[in-house]
Amino acid sequence: MTVTRPMLNISADFDSGNIQVIDASDPRHVRLAIRPDTHSDHFQWFHFKVANLSLGERHDFVLENAGQSSYNDAWHGYHAVASYDQKVWFRVPSQYDGSALRFGLEPTQQQIWFAYFEPYSRERHDWLVEQALNLAGMQLIAVRKSAEGREIPLLRKGDGAPGKRKIWLIAQQHPGEHMAEWFIEGIIERLQQTDDKELNALLAVADIYLIPHMNPDGAFHGHLRTNAMGKDLNRAWQDSSAEYTPEVFFAQQQMDKYGVDLFIDAHGDEAIPHVFTAACEGNPGYTPRIADLELTFRQVLQAQTPDFQTLHGYTLDEPGQANMTLACNSVGARFDCLAMTLEMPFKDHDDAPNEVTGWSGKRSAQLGKDVLSAIGKVVHLLR
């Protein structure tokens, strides 16, 4: 008797989904490709569901165009994430040969999701905003629509009283960097704690402004780098517009309205397996005051958590050679303030590795909580 195996059902027609099926006829060798961002050649993010898996049988998947992706060298040492329920995510051993990325497993359930990193869904984003408003005591002080009409809220913890320091944190300018909104979730979770003495001391002298997700269109469409108009938001801080980069245009309007004393832009880095910061050393007019603030903040955060380090990161900009289209550099110069890009890995943090999860949403959230502690220790130095 011959038993006919059902064909695999591979889909990505959902929030942040991204995959193209080349050939799924052989479950032992499923050929796939990552779809580029709309109106852009960038691609690296993938997220797809596989149904009709055969239990106890090995299934292998090949991303055949990985070698042409935006950061193709970053696949070395990378392992894909998978989940049977979209709640618990784990790493799947993966191999990159310079051309294609391969990963696979013997499933324990008949359907599974694979992704570049643990996704942060739009549904969870909406839940997070509700948590911020209903449990963390935050205010919705402004909202803007993205190019495709998705809401971008600006939240504030604090009363906006004169003299208070303005602490700004934004996340996910690059839509494939989902660890950034997990980072914001950790901040909002900590803001719900009414008996946190360290946090209360910070809030007595500072207001916290959050934009939890800067690029909802790009994330929904499964982009790596750009918004719905094909624009890299973190290269738009010198020429933002209501038409092409309304997300940045909105953030700049609100910063001009309220002011900025400290700015952190949360991101993910494809290649570097560490948590690190980039700052404003290349800005025109960079001063010893800002240099001292950067050094102090890094020292405080490194003492706060083993998940932050200062040895590995980007090459420092030469004096006067900063890319002023980046949010960190632009905001730092515009407001003469401490401004940093905070990078988290897509891989793992090699200084504190976790073989099961690698760097994860949970670890990103904890980093958000730790960053609040670091801010509390430097807030009195900001001006």
Image: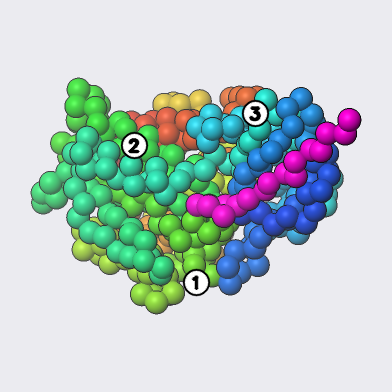
Report x, y in % for residue 297: 39, 38
Looking at the rendered structure, the kind of residue marked 1 is: Met
Q: Name above or below for residue 303 compared with residue 256.
A: above
Residue type highlighted by circle 2: Ile
Q: Which residue is mark 2?
A: 187
Ranked by sequence position, the earlier of labels 1 and 2 is 2
Pointer 3 local density, CA inside 10 Å: few below 14, some 14–19, many at least 20: some
259 left or right, relative to 355: left
Residue type at tag 3: Gln
Image x and y of residue 157, in percent: 21, 43
- Residue picked out by circle 3: 109
* Count of picture labels: 3
The one of 227 and 331 positioned closer to us in this rendering: 227
Name the element at disc 3: loop
Q: CA distance from mark 1 to mark 3?
A: 38 Å
Residue drawn at the location 65% of the way across and 28% of the way down: 109
Q: CA distance from mark 2 to mark 3?
A: 34 Å
Residue 336 sits in which quadrant?
A: bottom left
Mark 1 touching mark 3, by CB under 8 A? no
According to the picture, the residue beneath numbered tag 1 turns out to be 229
Disc 2 packing (10 Å; few <14; some 14–19; many ≥20)? many
Instruction: Please report the bounds of the magenta region as a residue range.
Output: 1-17
- Where is residue 380 shown, x and y percent of the image? 24, 39
Q: Nearer the viewer, mark 2 or mark 3?
A: 3
Q: Is residue 363 left or right of residue 95?
A: left
Q: Residue at x 60, y 64 (%)?
A: 37
Ranked by sequence position, the earlier of labels 1 and 3 is 3
- Spatial CA distance of label 1 from label 2 is 30 Å
